[in-house]
Image: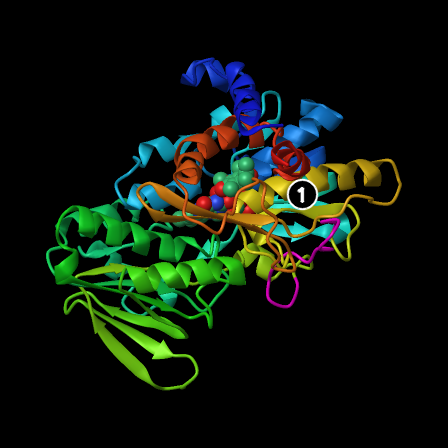
Amino acid sequence: MSASALRAQVSQWGRGCSRTYGWTSYQSLHSSTTCRAASKEHVKVLVLGGGSGGITMSARMKRKVGAENVAVVEPSEMHYYQPIWTLVGAGAKTVESSGRPTASVMPSGVRWIKSKVSEVSPDTNSVRTDCGKEITYEYLIVALGLQLHYERIKGLPEGLDHPKIGSNYSRKTVQKTWKALQDFKEGNAVFSFPNSPVKCPGAPQKIMYLTDAYLRKTGKRSSATITYNTSLPVLFGVKKYADALWEICKARDLNVNLRHNLVEVRPDKQEAVFEHLDKPGETKVFQYEMLHVTPPMGPLDVMKGSPLADGAGWLNLNKETLQHQLYPNVFGIGDCTNLPTPKTAAAVAAQSAVLDRTISRVMEKSQPDKKYNGYTSCPLVTSYNTVILAEFDYNLQPQETFPLDQGKERRVMYHMKADFMPHLYWHGMLRGLWGGPAPYRSVMHLGMK
Ligand code: FAD
Ligand code: UQ1
């Protein structure tokens, strides 16, 4: 399939979706349950979390077992396409474009239990919600995402109320990044990467490249020093893409300090304090005119204490089948899992196809036969019109979809990130129709030979 055929396929999926998302039209499409204390329910397939992984899997499960046999526990009224926040922070997209009501993405007929999971008891096949409702299940899919921990940095989260600090990682603070960028006059622009797993590990540096581009466009670059302080020992985990990014940093005069971890923000003095992870106790203060914070991240509290978690609190899965290591009727997807690959929506898409198959096999009482290879992808935005499209697997080997050298900055990849991916997400992935590019990869490469 060629790139244009792929585009045509997505627009075909989008067609049935042109019904309007007015409250009345989508409210009637599924049943939603609000909390009634001490009530009990039973469902065949229970999905925890209605984010990227939860909605995608509920659409797939609806096809498999019927909408009336699927329920999703999700507290939030709004569903966000988080990958676009990188461009929102740089003023290239609006935050409004990133969100749609959860009701509009919930597959019709699927029961939406609008509350938070507070306890998971896999030994009795039950979960409890924050208002005391008990839900029993036959099969459980955990898609709870992760938690942001701004509070682990001294001076935050209150510091985020001050100007000159932004963070693309939260709906509440992403527009502050754009404000700080517009208000920048002269001085240091500082970017952090925490000492924890993160979702989309490229995002903390993408906003640096966009800042550089914006300051060049507005004639302020010569009055700015740009510094990326990362806790990691590398700029990016895959050598091919790391090499390309180092070249860009050199060419654009972007300073990179490895093993530097943000520990304190002093917004009144515009100071950010970083510790050197290889020299315990040694800290360095960076004066800033603009600071972009990527917060530490970790598993949800409800996961940490649960029998489903590994020692670190992540959902303990078989990394190929996505079935739980101890509970065969429990499965997982996305940021809440301990799968050893970067946490991205692209990974969720690829995982959804494998998990769909694994669950079918388990329901038929046979062995899972499809294997997830760790596929993940990170469109590394390097300016307002270029992207390096990183795609790789568990072994950190590139798994490129297109028959081009994806280690180069390309305009076409920027359009894919900014314009095509949101459609693929809303109309393909969330409807359970997009399971990642693997089926197209060999055809794409063949087509160009
Ligand atoms: P989420 O989509 O976060 O969903 C988790 C859901 O669980 C949420 O709806 C939440 O409300 C719900 N929940 C939380 N607590 C409870 C509870 N107690 N009970 C019930 N429900 C609960 N990915 C890419 O592929 N490409 C990119 O370019 C990219 N860029 C990114 C840039 C930024 C700035 C950010 C923040 C993310 C980016 N990502 C990107 C990552 C991507 O958005 C996530 O990996 C993806 O959304 C993970 O899906 P998920 O379902 O695991 O988690
Ligand atoms: C992808 O499948 C996906 O999920 C919808 C993303 O999330 C937004 C991505 O950023 C990328 C790059 C992919 C991979 C898709 C292709 C066509 C390479």
- Label count reads 1
Q: Residues within 10 Å of mark 1 (few under 14, many from 20)?
A: many
Residue 319 among those drawn in magenta: yes
Residue 82 among those drawn in magenta: no
Q: Nearer the viewer, residue 85 or 119?
A: 85
Residue drawn 76% across and 57% down?
Answer: 325
Q: Quadrant of residue 31?
A: top right
Residue 272 rendering spot, x and y as whole percentages? 25, 70
Where does the C terminus fall, quadrant-wise? Answer: top right
Query: Left of 180 or right of it: where is 404?
Result: right
Residue hosting label 1: 141
Q: Quadrant of residue 192?
A: bottom left
Query: Left of 393 or right of it: where is 251?
Result: left
Colouring scheme applied when the structure was drawn: rainbow
For the stretch drawn in magenta, the main secondary structure is loop
Residue 446 rendering spot, x and y as whole percentages? 66, 35
Q: What residue occupies the far front of the structure in this picture?
A: 449
Q: Which residues are magenta?
A: 310-323
Residue drawn 41% across and 59% down?
Answer: 245
Residue 70, relative to residue 307: is it above or below? above
Residue drawn 71% across and 55% down?
Answer: 319
Q: Is any part of residue 140 visible from this angle?
A: yes
Q: Nearer the viewer, residue 24 or 384?
A: 384
Q: Secondary structure at mark 1?
A: strand
Q: Is any part of residue 117 visible from this angle?
A: no
Residue 274, relative to residue 123: is it above or below? below
